[in-house]
Structures are given as structure tokens and as C-alpha cells.
Amino acid sequence: MNILILGSGGREHAFAWKVKQSPKCEKIFIAPGNGGTNKVGTNLDLDINNFDKVGDAIEKHDIGMLIIGPEDPLVNGIVDHLREDKKFENLKIIGPKAKGAILEGSKEYAKEFMKKHGIPTADAITVTKENLDETIKYMERLDPPYVLKADGLAGGKGVIITEELEEARKSLRELIEGKKFGSASEKVLIEQFLKGIEVSFFVITDGKDYRILPEAKDYKRIGEKDTGLNTGGMGAVSPVAFADRAFKEKVNNRIIKPTIEGLKKEKIDYCGFIFFGLINVGGDPYIIEYNVRMGDPETEVVLPRIKTDFLELLVAAADKNLIDTEIEYERFTASTVMYVSRGYPEFYEKGHEIIIGDVKTVLPFHAGTKMKDGKLVTNGGRVIALTGLGKNLGEALSKSYAGGQEVTWEGKRFRGDIGFDLKALGQ
């Protein structure tokens, strides 16, 4: 089977790396890919939001399965577009139609879905230009921290958390009146702050049944000890010590099952991944957000821990036959550290040559890289994720950081404390 993976990040590199291990995989194409994916498969210079061009590539390369990595094309309806064309009626697609993708495309819709189906989450109100001034006054009655979330897609950067009332008010005006994230922040949710520790859960579902993938914990803030601006993710680890059997049962019974059942009740035919961004509040899980795809950089630690043939799982999901599958995990710990460009997540430089030495002790997953004039150069804020595997968290992280010493470019930055909170818990 020939596989086409849409996307250009570390997640898509990890997908290609994992899928290639299956004997059912013949050729892998990644569109547009990056400077590392071309070592796993063939990069295609393609705008993934030009659905006609994607369709042409599927025909040209005799693609049997399409795996959609990022959220944009899903929310924009790529699956609907392809399913309307009889040429692709036998194409296996991993990713929901637009009706399902709205779980990530609109935080307001997701919050209403959670409440409707009895899924534990934080309370929230929706703010628009019409009720902005009223809400600014109302915020005086709220207790800090203040949590502001852009309703639409904002590249993982649409959440603002602050202890200061005036900063919260200013940020709210910047989001709505200043259109900080364009149409994504025409609506903003002010959400109840939940105090606890975050964890990410993932499932692959065929719309009827599902299989739970290894959990992970990622680190969004640019600065150590979770300070500074939000990013797309500075690192991740899996497994997560506090996510024991009892906690996982709560997650499954209170959040995952009701979500899958809710999709059925809403008559949403969903095939693909669901990311559950959770917070552990005193041993009880609450959901912060849904994503309708795998997270990044969590994918870089989740996929190495899947012992089962990953492509077989995906085929079963696409064929709506997950009920006949099982999933087995590896017992080791995986950690990934994201090495980023100077200035990220704000203005950052591109085009610096990357020198990679001996990285045999880690799995290097490229993100913001590309080949230019025969050289590997930086092409994004998050440049490369280095995944270490070990018998415990300390061993895995030591490999991720040691690998980082073998990768250099001008302005390289990283967080030196990934997993710090889990180490404090004894993982």
C-alpha cells in the first residue's frame, strides 16, 4: 500500500517513521514534508489546503491511504472534498470530516458538546465584540488566574493565562478588537482556571470503537518551570507516572467513552485521532480541549511506545473494523526535547545551516527544517525533536539532551527542564 502523509512537522516525520516499519507499507509520500522526511519517503511540494492538487497527487502516486497530520485541512473540509469524488471511494482516510473537525475548530462548540454529553470540564463564557465592554466589567468579579482562549485555530498559541486583571482585560481587547489571531479570535472564551497537572490522552477511532494510545505530557511554555509564552510544544514524555490504572479508568469512563458516544448521538461519522487535553485535579480528570489529530511533540513519544503494527491499526480504523484489533505498548519510557530557533515563539530567524553529528542514541524527528543548496537549514520556529528511549525517565531524558549536543545551528534554544514536574513526583 502506498501512503500519503499531509504535513511538514515532527508529527508527520514520526508518522512516516512508524508506518514504514509495517510490512504492509510499500511507498511513503509526505507533503510537503521537511529536511528529514525525505530520508524516510518522498517529499511532495504541495499546498495541503489545495484539495484538488492533493487529489491529483493521490491519483498520480496510486495512494491507498491518506493520513492527515495538521488541523487546518481537516477543519477546512479536505475529507468531505475527497469523499464527494467517486475516484476516491476506495481511498482509506485517517481524519474526520469537517463536521467532526469542529471539535477543534471551535472551542465554543467543543465546550457545548462537553456540557451536552456530561463530560467534566471547566465552566466558560463566550465573549464577542457585542458583549466585550460588559465582560470587561464582569471580569472584576472573577478570581485570578484569568484564562482566555481564542475560539478558532491559532497554531497552539491562542491561550493566555494571567494573574493580572488589567493584563487580562488588555489581552481580551487585543484578541477581539485587535484581531490578534484574525477570525480565530472573533470569539474568545473566558474559562474557569483549574489547578492541577496536565496530561494528554489519544485514541484512534473508527466512529464506533476506539483504541487508547499511550498517554503523554507535553510542555507548552517557552521558559523553564513553565514560564513565558505558549508555544506549539517544547518537549514531551511518556508514560506519565500519575496516570495510573485508576486514573486511566476515570479518563476512559468519564471522558473518552462519553465523547465517542456523543459523536454517535450527533450523527458524526468520525474516523481518525482524537486528542484529549486533560488536567488532573485531585485525582479527577477534566478536559481542557479536544484536538482532532495527534499532538506535536507528543506524537514523537507516543508512536515509539506502540508495539502493535501501527499501519494495521490505521487500516482497521479506516475499514471500521477496530473491534477486531488489540494494541500493545512498549514498556520503556520515551522523552523528546524540542530544539527551537532563537526568538521563537515570536519573531525568529530562518536559513541557518544545521550540523548534525552522531545522533544514534536518539530518534531525530525534523520539524522546521529544509534542504537548500544541498545543505540542511532551519525553516521554522521548532526545528528538531530528539527522542530518547530508556528504562526510566532519567535515562530517556539524558539521551534526548546528549543528542542535542550533536545538533548545532546559530541561535539554537531549548528547555533544560523537560519532565521536571514528573521527576518531583518520583517518575
Image (cartoon, rainbow, N blue to C red):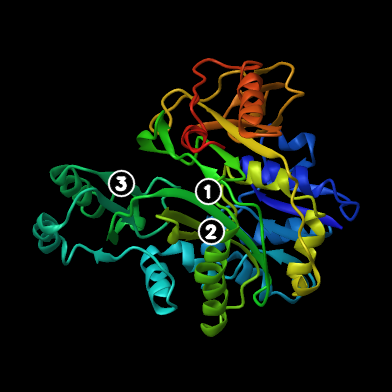
Indicate which disc residue 289 carries.
none
Q: Amino acid at mark 2?
A: Phe
Q: Which quadrant would residue 321 be assigned to in this image?
A: bottom right
The answer to which of 22 and 183 lies nearer the viewer is 22
Q: Position of residue 413 (x, y in %)?
A: 49, 22
Q: Secondary structure at mark 1?
A: loop
Of circles 3 and 2, the one toward us is: 2
Give left or right: position of 162 versus 245: left
- Precedes in sequence: disc 3 or disc 2: 3
- Outermost residue on the right side: it is 23
Q: Residue at x 53, y 59 (%)?
A: 247
Residue labelled with disc 1: 242
Where 23 sits versus 41, above or below? below
Q: Which quadrant would residue 403 be assigned to in this image?
A: top right
- Precedes in sequence: disc 1 or disc 2: 1
The N terminus lies in quadrant = bottom right
**For the residues bearing labels 1 and 2, Cβ distance under 8 angstroms:** yes
Where 187 sits versus 301, above or below? below
Q: Position of residue 372 (x, y in %)?
A: 66, 25
Residue labelled with disc 3: 160
- Precedes in sequence: disc 1 or disc 3: 3
Q: Amino acid at mark 3?
A: Ile
Q: Residue at x 75, y 76 (%)?
A: 86
Residue labelled with disc 2: 247
